[in-house]
Amino acid sequence: MSSSASDAAGDLFAANLKGSLLAVASSAFIGVSFIVKKKGLRRAAGAGARAGVGGYGYLLEPLWWVGMVTMLVGEIANFIAYMFAPAVLVTPLGALSIIVSAVLAHFTLNEKLRRVGVLGCGLCIVGSTMIILHAPQERTPSSVEQIWHLATQPSFLCYAAVAVGVSLFLMLYCAPRYGQTNIIVYVGICSVIGSLTVMSIKAVGIAIKLTIEGINQAGYFQTWVFAVVSATCIVIQLVYLNKALDTFNTAVVSPIYYAMFTTLTILASAIMFKDWSGQRASNIASEICGFLTVLAGTVVLHSTREPDPTVSADMYAPLPPKIYWHIQGNSDIGKQRDDDSLTCEFITVVRQDYFV
């Protein structure tokens, strides 16, 4: 191998290493932000309409904004990571945020993590390590026009059209009907839109990196198109992620969101940037095994967590027609009356088995 080829390989390895470290730091911040935002949403729910039913009172809650700032720091680190490393490497490392949020939720939100959950955390770490060691070495495009050419390929345009169509269907039809009962609705919107977010953010990041290196990309209209798409997708993600966090347990939202988001992002990146082009079959197989290991870890972690307490259906069941009750008066103690005049329309607000 020539010295120039060795130098190029070394530069690509260094870029991947920078991207990996930034992705790990990003996961830590984002994992913390999940917990802080959840606490803020709980506080806001006590003062007004919950985010899960369309309320926006959380915007006045300082703790929620602390969580947002923490998430912003994590997303900036993640944004920079995409400048150096391919999405196939950066995105799966988001599994580490699940470990952070699971551990913190155990201590701060009383969402208990059982002992087997440690196995799930270990699987996430092992899978992430495999992905890092076998990640493809991506060459940065030399202009935003090249990225635009990749984004306008028929294959990626088809993916983008399907993603937008599915998102609109979920937002306009499914969310009003099933959003409060089916976690896949809110999380699905975040994941599908998120895959487009990553592609546009990666394009903007590369444009910024090239501009810093002296190749100005601000004059290309494609740069601003990618920026507008990124901002729009981020806003949609935040809205529906807040709905998901407020409606369902963090322990459920985090792993499902990670699994769906990562899978779709890897698919979108493989279509647009052709990350696996030129890689050996053994490396691709190792990356897939690493990703499946991470998914297995998230499933184990999710399966060992306690769900949110739900309201039992029998709490609002009608009482039987005959109710026996006690009267204590001045002279009569313990008299029992069989009141046939009461009907089944008399509704309890506590469980029936509380009555004696």
Image (cartoon, rainbow, N blue to C red):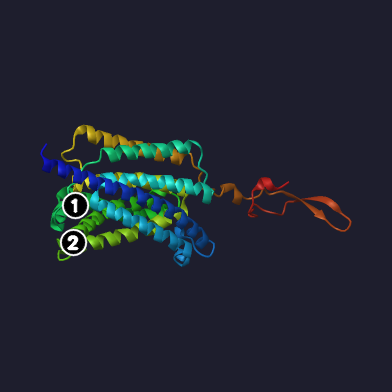
Can residue 222 be seen at all in this image of the molecule? yes
Q: Residue 302 vs residue 158: left or right?
A: right
Q: Residues within 10 Å of mark 2 (few under 14, many from 20)?
A: some
Q: Residue at 32% across / 55% down in the picture?
A: 77
- Residue projecting furthest to the top: 282
Q: Which mark is residue 263?
A: none
Question: Which percent across, then down, holds residue 323?
Answer: 72, 50
Label 1 belongs to which residue? 157
| Three-letter code for the amino acid on which mark 1 is drawn | Leu
Question: Which percent across, then down, holds residue 248?
Answer: 46, 51
Can residue 265 be seen at all in this image of the molecule? no
Q: Residue at 24% across / 50% down in the picture?
A: 84
Near-viewer residue (236 or 297): 297
Q: Residue 192 vs residue 213: left or right?
A: right
Judging from the image, what secondary structure is the residue with disc 2 in? helix
Judging from the image, what secondary structure is the residue with disc 1 in? helix
Q: Which mark is residue 211?
A: 2
Question: Which percent across, then down, holds residue 209?
Answer: 21, 58
Q: Residue at 62% across / 50% down in the picture?
A: 318
| Sequence order check, earlier mark of 1 and 2 | 1
| Three-letter code for the amino acid on which mark 2 is drawn | Thr
Question: Which percent across, then down, holds residue 224?
Answer: 20, 64
Q: CA distance from mark 1 to mark 2?
A: 27 Å
Task: State which quadrant residue 75 falls in.
Answer: bottom left
Q: Residue at 83% across / 50% down in the picture?
A: 334
Q: Residue 49 vs residue 73: left or right?
A: right
Q: Residues within 10 Å of mark 1 (few under 14, many from 20)?
A: some
- Vertical comparison of 271 with 286: above or below: below
Q: The N terminus lies in which quarter of the figure?
A: top left
